Image (cartoon, rainbow, N blue to C red):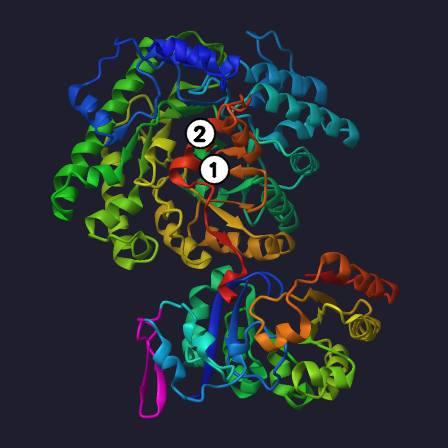
Amino acid sequence: MMKAPVNKIIPFSNVDGPGNRCAIFFQSCPFSCLYCHNPETIHMCMHCGDCVTTCPTNALTLEAGKVLWNSEKCVDCDTCIHTCTHLASPKIRYMSVEELVEQIKAKKAFLRGITVSGGECMNHAAFLLDLFKKVKKLGLTCLIDSNGYYDFSQYPQLMAVCDGVMLDVKAVDAKFHQYLTGCDNTMVLKNLAYLLHTQKLEEVRTVILPNQDLQNEKTVRYVSELLKQQSRYKLIRYRQYGVREEGLKALGNTTVSQMYVAQYKQICEENGNTTSIII
Amino acid sequence: MSRVKDIISDPTLTYQQQLLALARLAENDDDSLPLKPEMKKALEEETLCDLGEGRAPYRPRYILPDYQKLMKEGCAFLGLQPPTDIWEATNALLIMYKHVPSITSFPVYLGNFADLFTPFDKDEEETRKALRLFLLHIDKTLTDSFVHANIGPEDCRVARIILDLTKEMQLAIPNVTLLYDPERTSDEFAKACIDCMLATAKPSFANDVMYRQDGIGEYGIASCYNALKIGGGGYTLPRIRLYNVASKAKDKADFMEHILPYYVNMMLEFMDDRIRYIVEESNFFKANFLVKEGFVKRENFTGMFGVVGLAECCNHLLGIKDPKEGYGHNEKAHQLGVEIMNAIETMVKNHHGLYCEGCHNQYVLHAQVGIDSDGRENSPGARIPIGCEPDLCDHIAVECNFHKYFVSGIGDIFKFDDTWNNTPDALLDIIKGAFAQGMRYFTGYNADNDVVRVTGYLVKKSEIEKLDRQEASLNNVTVFGQGARNTANALDRRVYDESARK
């Protein structure tokens, strides 16, 4: 049976697409963004065992070279996350589609749909296809929250059952994107055009960074011009919470103000993109 | 010390509040309604509670007049003709409100504003002006947040104006409830109500489908969230404090077989005594114009059997010391809760209620919202204790088990962060789901508001601060809010936010 590594399930989420949604966060991501709020979702556990020694409740053990997590003993203090030097988490559950569907089913009356996120959920595309097929049968919508690393045009079956993609466009400038995420953005921009064309673009998100006026403007101009009114554009204020040391050093330790982002909303409006909202 | 002089010299009381306190003092000096010794003991040991209703009840606790009758026929005693425009309609109601008795001496039910005013809503600006003055008049003269109006289920211009004005004026009075039926209430209207609720803690949502299925007939939501018949009401509302009752029991079996029935039956007899006194001794049902002219009928009244402390009762009987591992988080505690409520419901239903023919000769269960002296030992009704709230979905799921029992009202309060201000769709999905799963009443507010819902009623945080500074507050219930904040942490509910994602 196919299983995928799940970092977290938020049974009720009001910020992962329209309505009340169950948000499922899968582990591992090809990007390594400086401002990642959940850097422990980036890599799979290497089983080095560092966290086993610091866990205050002995919820972690090292057996046959593998770190095992006992959720009963765990008190969610996140000491393991702070100990880990590999941007990973030992608190991962390998779940089958059936297990996930059971959980979703139990909350169905309250939900408009599910949103898969991460990490980068497209690391587990085959799993998502199976999950979506079953969730659609419950009458719920299925959204993908993605960084656009994978070429969506290569997943026609998944696109057919998916109700939309919420795409991050972190930067339009290729070099800056490389600096921010460790990866190239050619595919991200290709996906932006593809999803827009196939009407699968639920929304686009850009994090507005402190002291990066030129890059912020370049990205917002490009995206808003392309989107016009065809899709929602979320301008997300950079927040320092959860950002790792390296990121804080590079990007700063303050939250971007509403006022600072207002100038970019203005650019959106000048470009005929009236759907932008500041988060 | 002179209790009279204490009241007279208290700098935090307005003149009206002094008058009511002095009247209560006088009433409690009377013993024409004898208190049985075992009941006196139960009150002293705080297993049962009379909610300070007074020793000699001279009116029903809650009265829900049929205001449509006033609109159609006027009122002879008050010399009011049927109104012909929005000014006469608001004026006639404001006059009548001041003659509707209640436990607080303010009317706990103001009617369904949408139904009452729609026939007179000719010009939008004029309606808006009339309703603005009407709401201001209510806030400044019916100075008690148990004063409660209804809107819905259908959308209409009057209801939209009420929402606009509620948001704009930020008044704690009146309390407002939307009677919500997903078939009759449009999503657009429901979302406008959610927007207003997050900003002002009202309107709350009542599950109209569920209330109608209960077969109480035409009903209104009064006081905190009491569902009672229009043209009737509730005679009295004593309460059983389940935690205190449980602590009298040797074990669970002793509780279920002896202790619980002993106190439930004692409280039912206490209700009989009070209701008999209200109907047979007081002049209300013989002489009051509301009765004589048919704005209320005696057979439409019933007794409300109040329950508090289910959570702590279950935890105590199961020997659970840490409330974070008990009721709200523990399937065994929920099963025991259901067992206890089944037992209470059976006893209450089997008791032949006095003078409540229109309510199947039965008293009704009410999940009472608590008073400040309950402290932290008895959470309101069947609520999960403050400070121990599980995730939102589990919070709702647990409480859905218990809403069916409380025909005359139950509900919890959910506190949200500001992300929800932008996502009324998400909250509507949750309310729809909760109501489909058996939740009777849902209310919430944004964590940063001045107007907040304490346990069932509304206060302004800024008004509580006035009392803290030893200044008077016009709203009679601000002092309850202060007490509930101080003793029961009632303003420290869990904020449902994004903390789950860290």
Circle nearer the N terminus (1, 2): 1
Question: Is A21 in front, or is A239?
Answer: A239
Q: Which residue sits at x=69%, y=64%?
A: A237
Disc 2 chain ID: B
For the C terminus of chain A, the image quarter is bottom right
Disc 1 chain ID: B
Total labels: the figure holds 2
Q: Are marks 1 and 2 in contact (CB under 8 Å)?
A: yes
Residue B454 numbered tag:
1
Q: Position of residue B30 (x, y in %)?
A: 29, 8
Q: Position of residue A15 (x, y in %)?
A: 60, 63
Q: Secondary structure at mark 1?
A: loop
Residue indicated by mark 2: B480
Q: Position of residue B71 (x, y in %)?
A: 62, 20
* On screen, residue A263 above or below B445: below
* Residue lying farthest to the right in this orientation: A270
| Residue B291 makes an appearance in the image | no
Q: Answer few, some or many: residues within 10 Å of disc 2's Cα (few below 14, many 20 plus, some between 14 and 19).
A: some
Q: Which residue sits at x=48%, y=86%?
A: A44
State left or right for residue B473 relative to residue A98.
right
What type is the residue that disc 2 sits on? Answer: Phe
Please tell me whether residue A71 belongs to the stretch shown in magenta: yes
The residues bearing labels 1 and 2 have C-alpha atoms spaced at a distance of 9 Å
Question: Is A79 in front, or is B166?
Answer: A79
Q: Secondary structure at mark 2?
A: helix
What type is the residue that disc 1 sits on? Answer: Val
Please tell me whether residue B21 belongs to the stretch shown in magenta: no
| Residue B450 makes an appearance in the image | yes
Residue A201 numbered tag:
none
Question: Is B34 in front, or is B45?
Answer: B45
Question: Which region shows up in magenta?
Answer: A57-74
